[in-house]
Image (spheres, rainbow, N blue to C red):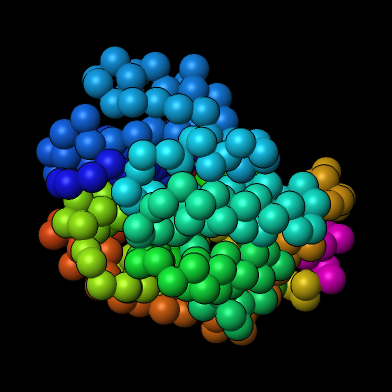
Amino acid sequence: MTGKLLVTGASGKLGAAVVHHLLDTFHVPASSLIAGSRDPARLADIAARGVETRAVDFDDAALAEGFAGADRVLIISTDALDAEGTRLRQQLVAVAAAKSAGVSHIAYTSMPNPGEAKVLFAPDHKGTEDAIKATGLGYTIFRNSWYMENLMMTLPQALAMGQWFTSAGTGRIAHIARDDVARAIAASLAKEASENATYTLTGPAARTTEDIAALVSKVTGKPLAVVHVSDEQLAQGMEGAGVPAPMVPTLVSFDTNTRDGKVDIVTDDATALSGSGATSLEDFLTTVKPALLG
């Protein structure tokens, strides 16, 4: 691989996995990589392997310095959902800093169908994609479907109650393992694709909530009934369960988005990029069975 590749958010779950696959799966030399994080101290393990580490904070006025010397950059979308507009502001700053630093190619982790999705933060992704394209630089957009790991925010509690409350209706999602996403992204970055591209990274099958519940019951041996409710009822239930009020509308919008078919997408982009098979949802659930059962 020629030139330097900067991975932002390298201390996060996805960023760390991308760096791991670049080094260990696709054998990219450590000298070709730069790992960035708001807290570089969390990158000690990567630094010990010879990877240059830097402070890369999208709220830092000197952000362009963090991008200096990089030929390409992977901008991993931030997790700033505390206030409307924060995430988009941060990411637009990062795009501008990358261009100012002389980067030739920007890769970005987005979401499926950001222009039409009902998820409340979808405009953040659409706005960032548009800004990247407007720079005139080369780009690769990775539209990541919902991670299998995200199910663990709901399933253990639902399984304990024996009921899974949802307003997703008969909508379907092709969940994908986070590591499968990381491997696909790393594969693309290791190949240094020169043409602009947008990939939608999904699992191999789209399932309804009932489909997922049936798999959970099969794996755990415990019953899990799906209870269909309205968006309003789901919001009330979340508030009653102690979910922080500012997060409730965003969480409900996930189900709205699913119900409206905005994430019912299945592609082979992830496996085509990585050259590896996909993790099945049943295999994932089997792996996390102890956590599901508490």
* Residue 150 shows up from this direction: no
Between 173 and 67, the one nearer to me in the picture: 67
Question: Does 113 sit above or below residue 142?
Answer: below
Magenta: predominant secondary structure element? helix
Between 191 and 244, the one nearer to me in the picture: 191
Horizontal side of residue 13 vs 125, given as left or right: left
Query: What residue lies at 83% left-to-right and 68% top-to-bottom?
Result: 233
Q: Tell me, yes or no, whether the highlighted magenta stretch contains residue 237.
A: yes
Residue 57 percent coordinates (x, y): 59, 36
Residue 243 percent coordinates (x, y): 79, 46
Query: What residue lies at 45% left-to-right and 27% top-to-bottom?
Result: 54
* Residue 244 shows up from this direction: yes
The magenta span reads 232-238
Question: Does 244 sit above or below residue 130?
Answer: above
Residue 152 percent coordinates (x, y): 53, 46
Query: What residue lies at 33% left-to-right and 20% top-to-bottom?
Result: 47
Horizontal side of residue 292 vs 35, given as left or right: right
Q: How many marks?
A: 0
Residue 284 percent coordinates (x, y): 34, 49
Between 74 and 229, the one nearer to me in the picture: 74
Between 188 and 98, the one nearer to me in the picture: 98
